[in-house]
């Protein structure tokens, strides 16, 4: 499945895809899904030139058939102006493992339910422990969309592009520059949606709300200005801010106002006549991954839906942005999800629930091997007082990166079973969040820009050499 050269890759696509220099044409769109897995594998596990060329090819194939990396900014701002309904909540889905397989399930459910308002995302921390840089992540998503025949604006998001409080304390410039470098890498890859998370720097010991939020809103404004300087022509990256760190105390309307007033004032002070954030993340009682009990099960968590509704309404009516965002929600009880559209939540972030399905359905002997790997390699993260079940549940997400290929190589029947279960989960969430039949709405508001990219020069050189060699034989 892994090819050794660009000509070998193009040979495998013969009759379906034609490449002429920088021009990519689809000769047989009906046969394209059959080539998606080959492309996904080489975009991830291919080496050097083959990997880079495959990623470029996936980008151009997406453009050719109508899979267009896009910003959701215009949809969110239209909601802030009251021009689109507020009775749906956009799912933002973090895919940590088996990304091609998992994304296929999401696209299949989205196609069946006519879902256009959906986001795929990955956080700064996840990029590290799942070993998925932005260019790889986006390429695999395009391959999954090709596999399932999905078309439309593709919203890919940098989630929690977070300034570490510890890193900032030790070396502020270095920590902020690390986030800037990641933003630049993400935009170059095609992430046109980024959540700036400087809420880690909120200092609740300060006497006033403005002082508590000051470092948060000043750095968020600074990173907004930086991001806008990197945007491709015609693209307004959708940016999010955050006022309360997930897992902390619940946010208040007064904190929202303090952040937005300071953020707006800071942009103005920099003479920054540019769009600001289009959404705001708040804390309403959840935590990432859920609260794990000693036996490894999850504690029931209650979301403060009244606070969420109040904050979302205030964000729209007072500040003109799309609304409030809920993090850490995928492990909530099923009956909770229908309440998010009811309280007009703009966006909800989902991750651990999909990971749990993969572990639940993976072969037991494989999971046992993964757990042994975790105990051998992450023992330093086993906190005092944690049971083994708690430690494994909290840490097993970190096995997706080091064991990526082993996860991808699980038997085809196992992957099919996983896809079926994941598709049911995605469909359930799409229906409860009321995003079915949003394709037309998205198409009316969001106008993606087609941005062709040149083929890697070295790849062109190799292809030319191969042709020359053939002619001389």
Image (cartoon, helix red, strand yellow):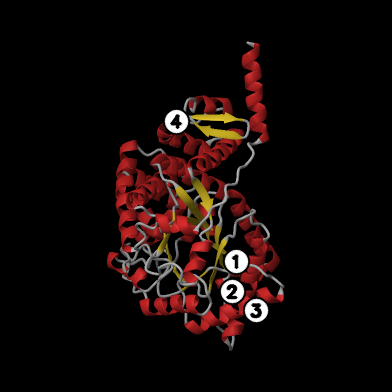
Rendering quarter of residue 34? top left
Question: What element does badge 1 sit on?
Answer: loop
Q: Nearer the viewer, mark 3 or mark 1?
A: 3
Q: Nearer the viewer, residue 104 or 162?
A: 104
Question: What element does badge 3 sit on?
Answer: helix
Q: Badge 4 local density, few (<14 within 10 Å), some, or many (20+)?
A: few
Question: Are discs 1 and 2 less than 8 Å apart at CB?
Answer: yes
Question: Are discs 4 and 1 less than 8 Å apart at CB?
Answer: no
Indicate which disc residue 265 carries. 3
Indicate which disc residue 201 carries. 2
Residue 444 horizontal/vertical position (percent): 46, 57
Question: What element does badge 2 sit on?
Answer: helix
Side of 333 where 176 appears, left or right: right
Q: How far separated are the C-alphas under marks 3 and 1?
A: 21 Å
Indicate which disc residue 28 carries. 4
Q: Badge 3 local density, few (<14 within 10 Å), some, or many (20+)?
A: some
Q: Nearer the viewer, mark 2 or mark 3?
A: 3
Indicate which disc residue 163 carries. 1
Q: Badge 1 local density, few (<14 within 10 Å), some, or many (20+)?
A: many
Residue 333 horizontal/vertical position (percent): 30, 66
Residue 31 horizontal/vertical position (percent): 41, 31
Label 4 or label 3, whichever comes before in sequence order: 4
Side of 413 where 192 appears, left or right: right
């Amino acid at each position: 499945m892994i090819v050794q050269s660009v000509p070998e890759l193009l040979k495998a696509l013969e009759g379906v895809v034609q490449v002429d220099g920088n021009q990519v044409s689809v000769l047989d769109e009906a046969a394209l899904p059959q080539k998606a897995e080959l492309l996904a594998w080489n975009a991830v596990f291919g080496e050097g030139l083959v990997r880079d060329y495959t990623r470029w090819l996936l980008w151009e194939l997406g453009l050719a058939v109508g899979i267009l990396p896009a910003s959701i900014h215009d949809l969110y701002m239209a909601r802030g102006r009251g021009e689109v309904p507020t009775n749906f909540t956009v799912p933002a889905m973090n895919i940590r493992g088996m990304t091609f397989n998992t994304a296929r399930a999401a696209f299949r459910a989205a196609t069946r339910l006519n879902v256009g308002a959906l986001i795929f995302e990955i956080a700064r921390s996840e990029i590290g422990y799942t070993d998925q840089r932005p260019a790889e992540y986006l390429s695999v998503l395009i391959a999954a969309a090709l596999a399932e025949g999905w078309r439309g604006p593709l919203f890919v998001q940098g989630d929690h592009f977070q300034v570490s409080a510890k890193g900032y304390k030790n070396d502020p410039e270095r920590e902020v520059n690390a986030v800037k470098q990641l933003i630049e890498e993400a935009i170059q890859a095609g992430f046109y949606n980024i959540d700036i998370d400087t809420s880690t720097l909120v200092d609740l010991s300060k006497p006033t709300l403005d002082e508590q939020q000051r470092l948060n809103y000043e750095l968020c404004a600074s990173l907004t200005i930086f991001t806008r300087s990197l945007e491709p022509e015609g693209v307004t990256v959708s940016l999010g801010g955050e006022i309360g760190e997930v897992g902390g105390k619940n946010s208040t309307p007064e904190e929202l106002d303090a952040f937005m007033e300071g953020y707006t004032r800071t942009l103005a002070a920099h003479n920054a006549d540019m769009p600001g954030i289009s959404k705001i993340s708040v804390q309403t009682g959840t935590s990432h991954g859920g609260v794990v009990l000693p036996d490894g099960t999850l504690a029931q968590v209650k979301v403060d839906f009244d606070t969420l509704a109040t904050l979302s309404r205030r964000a729209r009516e007072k500040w003109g942005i799309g609304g409030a965002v809920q993090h850490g929600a995928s492990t909530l009880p099923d009956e909770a999800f229908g309440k998010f559209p009811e309280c007009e939540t703009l966006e909800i972030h989902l991750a651990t629930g999909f990971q749990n399905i993969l572990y639940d359905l993976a072969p037991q002997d494989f999971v046992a091997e993964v757990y042994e790997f975790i105990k051998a390699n992450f023992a330093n993260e086993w906190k005092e007082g944690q049971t083994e079940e708690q430690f494994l549940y909290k840490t097993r997400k970190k096995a997706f990166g080091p064991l990526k290929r082993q996860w991808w190589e699980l038997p085809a029947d196992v992957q099919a079973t996983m896809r079926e279960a994941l598709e049911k989960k995605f469909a359930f969430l799409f229906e409860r969040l009321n995003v079915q039949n949003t394709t037309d709405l998205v198409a009316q508001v969001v106008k993606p820009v087609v941005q062709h990219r040149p083929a890697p020069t070295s790849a062109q050189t190799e292809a030319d050499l191969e042709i020359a060699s053939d002619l001389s034989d």
